[in-house]
Amino acid sequence: MPRRQGRADRSEHNGARRYSWRRATAPASPSSEPPTAPAAAPAPQDQGSVVNAALYRDGVRVATPDTLTDTYRQLREKPRTMAWIGLARPSDSELKSLAAEFDLHELAVEDAMEAHQRPKLERYGETLFVVLRAARYLDAPEEVEFGELHVFVGPDFVITVRHGAAPDLSAVRHRMEATPDLLRLGPEAVLYAILDAVVDGYAPVVSGVQNDIDEIETEVFSGAPAVSRRIYELSREMVEFQRATRPLVGMLHALMAGFAKYGTDEELQRYLRDVADHVTHTSERVDSFRQALADILTVNATLVTQQQNAEMRALAEAGFEQNEEIKKISSWAAILFAPTLVGTIYGMNFDHMPELHWMGGYPFALLLMAVVCTSLYVIFKRRDWL
């Protein structure tokens, strides 16, 4: 097939070359890759999820097909070209069409269909399959949103399958088209640019999480009641962030290990090493965030326990004071009850009551009241009730 012959031409064309290129930051686009103009009479299954498709020769765009069918045809007709196809949540039929055209392995296609994959790098013959987890920080809800990106890299094609809003692949495409010296290196250079964009996207997330942790520390020591939930939610996000960044370290080291075997351009090797350094730094920061949140959660639990103990102690002291007051009230009530009882009995005015007509009855009743009250007072005093 002409496309297969084009691969050999590209390998010869992409020989060793030296060039000077700086990492440029393309302006962020409000949406992912801008959709191409609709075809005159496209087949619905051809363009449903195609965000952008283009053919490049020597680092310059030479064609912008409207459908996958046009892309296949033009790639066969144009020698020494590279196809870069961007898809967003494609249908199964579209992925199967790509698999048939580019000889994609069925296991990789199955992963791209199902999504929810861990970051990984696998090689199937001449095709490299890469799964990336992009992340972006949402300021309003103070949350980290994760997206998933699948990349197929072959001798003369790059296919990106995006599940989620991040990363902004239109900015990656604009950046590469603005640096044709890098783009003419072929699919490996595009893979580098995608990896670089994903890793650079972690920086705002790291900054946002650091601000959240600083705020949480302030809330913990100020006794904010809802801080425990915020710590828990941020810890869950850091677990996901760690799952996105930690595998990238091994993936990039695996790429670097194959530099000599696959003849990676020397300058491109330097850029990939730079991405590996950034990934390592980000992974270390995420690990430190998880440890910091675990320590903050422990401190918060300790402070909450101390606060609860202080409240329980205050309640116990209040209960003790209340008990002492009840003792005093009860003691005086008992003392006053004694004369009330005697007076009540002798105040019933029955004719045939004992000692009713006795001359000493009244003094005796008063004396009895005094003796009982005094005895009760002495008893309560000895027991510290009064």
Image (tube, rainbow, N blue to C red):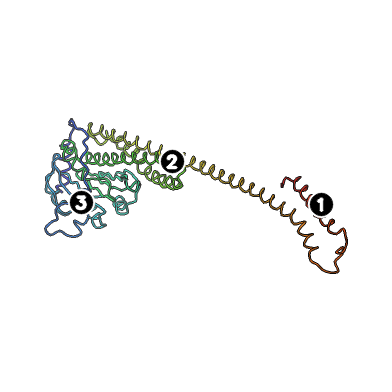
Q: Quadrant of residue 222?
A: top left
Asked if residue 7 lies left or right of residue 256, the reply is left
Q: Does the image show residue 177?
A: yes
**Relative height, residue 289 to residue 351 (above, below):** above
Residue 293 numbered mark, or none: 2
Question: Which residue is more in the foreground, 130 or 336?
Answer: 336
Q: Quarter-wise, where is residue 10 in the image? A: top left
Q: What distance separates the C-alpha of mark 3 from that of mark 2?
A: 39 Å
Q: Quadrant of residue 195?
A: top left
Identify the secondary structure beneath mark 2: helix
Q: Earlier in the sequence, mark 3 or mark 1?
A: 3
Q: Residues within 10 Å of mark 1 (few under 14, many from 20)?
A: some
| Residue bearing mark 3 | 51
Q: Is residue 275 left or right of residue 176?
A: right
The residue type indicated by label 1 comes to: Val
Residue at which label 1 appears: 371
Q: In whole angstroms, how far apart are the C-alphas of marks 3 and 1? A: 104 Å
Q: Tag 3, which secondary structure?
A: strand
